[in-house]
Amino acid sequence: MFSFLVSFVASALLTLLVIKQVTLHGPALDRDFESVQKVHVHEVARIGGLSIFLATVLSACITVWRVPLLSNWMFSLLLCAAIAFIGGILEDYTGKVSAFRRLILTMVAALLGVFLLDAKLGRIDFEVFTLMLPWLWFSIPITVLAVAGIANAVNIIDGFNGLAAVVVICMLISLGYVALQVGDTFVLVTALMVAGATAGFLIWNYPVGLIFLGDGGAYFIGFMLGELALLLVMRNPQVSTWYAALLLIYPAFETIFSAYRRMFVRGKSPTIPDGIHLHSLIFRRIVQWAIGRKEARALMRRNSLTSPYLWLFSLMAVIPATIFWRHTILLIIFCLLFVISYIWLYARIVRFKSPRWMIFRKQG
């Protein structure tokens, strides 16, 4: 908990400093109000990831000072994460780093993690046997794509105030809990450290978005999430590989489904942004009608009311993953149930047949 508290306080103060000094980083202000994925109506700094990254580094230095044995692991992981973070933060400042280049940088970071941390997929668990993956030509590319994919997936679900931050915090706390059960101190400390830094940012991001996570923040916490999940599973054979699959399934399946929808349903490039992610549909077709006209205050309220739907939806995966982290067959079943639930819910909302329990009525 010490690491969590240090990161939380440092991040909260650094984020406040960024907000107060917003006029000093004009290029990092989000002034795009017309894009299909934009719902804010005033200029907002989009470099919240900077404070998360700095708070994590500060907390890591203090942790290493207190527990020197963690130094090699800690600084190696942060070095890899910094590469993913750089691509995102440069995009936040310049707007000139394409999604493809950010993805390549994140893949480079994941590849470096293979050599510095031995963080590679070495097995896939099944109920009656374990499929070992000793072939580097196969396991390394799969690892690089998986870790980079999770980092990109967190960026994709970062559509509303607090959405990605709370989802990632819940996942990191789950990683910390399972790491505690198996005695993996490094994953436990690091997961709580990143969760604390993200929580410190969150108090300024939700419910009123005084600052945004930005690409730098999304890629950083997404990369750390993917690497820690991989390390926990590979370093501890008693943890099923399907634990990581179920834990990360919400952002991962959102990305896969979005790519499928854009390529095969709409016939467009999977990199072209659109406004029909699950969180976007919930905003427009469930929350929006209950608030009223498109005034700034109403728009801000709709923004903050959208995220809780997705927090609860993601917990449908996070909670069973945390409870059944060693039971492969149950984890596989919950993965299938989540995919079915996602597709059913998306189809209902897109056809204007939202489930009654999701709809609330305007009061007064």
Image (cartoon, rainbow, N blue to C red):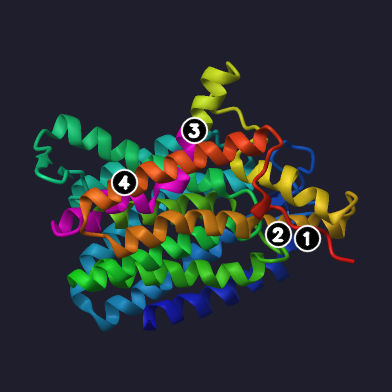
Alpha carbon distance from label 4 to label 2: 30 Å
Whole-angstrom CA distance, mark 3 to mark 4, is 19 Å
Q: Are marks 2 and 1 in contact (CB under 8 Å)?
A: yes
Q: Is residue 25 visible in this depiction of the protein?
A: no
Report which quarter residue 195 is drawn in.
bottom left
Q: Which residue is mark 4?
A: 333
Precedes in sequence: disc 4 or disc 1: 1
Estimate how packed mark 2 is, as few (under 14), some (14 to 19) or many (20 or more) residues with alpha carbons within 10 Å: some
Name the residue type under label 2. Answer: Leu
Residue 45's x, y, as percent?
69, 57
Q: What kind of residue is marked 1?
A: Arg
Secondary element under disc 1, as helix, strand or loop, is: helix
Q: State the separation of the CA atoms marked 2 and 1.
A: 6 Å
The residue depicted at 57 percent of the width and 19 percent of the height is 265
Residues rendered magenta in the picture: 231-256
Residue drawn at point x = 66 percent, y = 58 percent: 161
Name the kind of residue labelled 3 in the image.
Phe
Answer with mark 3 or mark 2, whichever residue precedes in sequence.
3
The amino acid pointed to by label 4 is: Ile
Residue at the disc numbered 1: 301
- Asked if one can make out residue 181 in the rendered structure from this viewpoint, the answer is yes
Establish if 120 lies above or below 57: above
Which residue, given by chain and number where applicable, does mark 2 sit on?
305
Q: Nearer the viewer, residue 295 or 18?
A: 295
Residue 189: x and y in percent read: 31, 73
Q: Main secondary structure of the magenta part?
A: helix
Looking at marks 3 and 4 on the same chain, the residue that comes earlier in the sequence is marked by 3
As drawn, the label of residue 257 is: 3
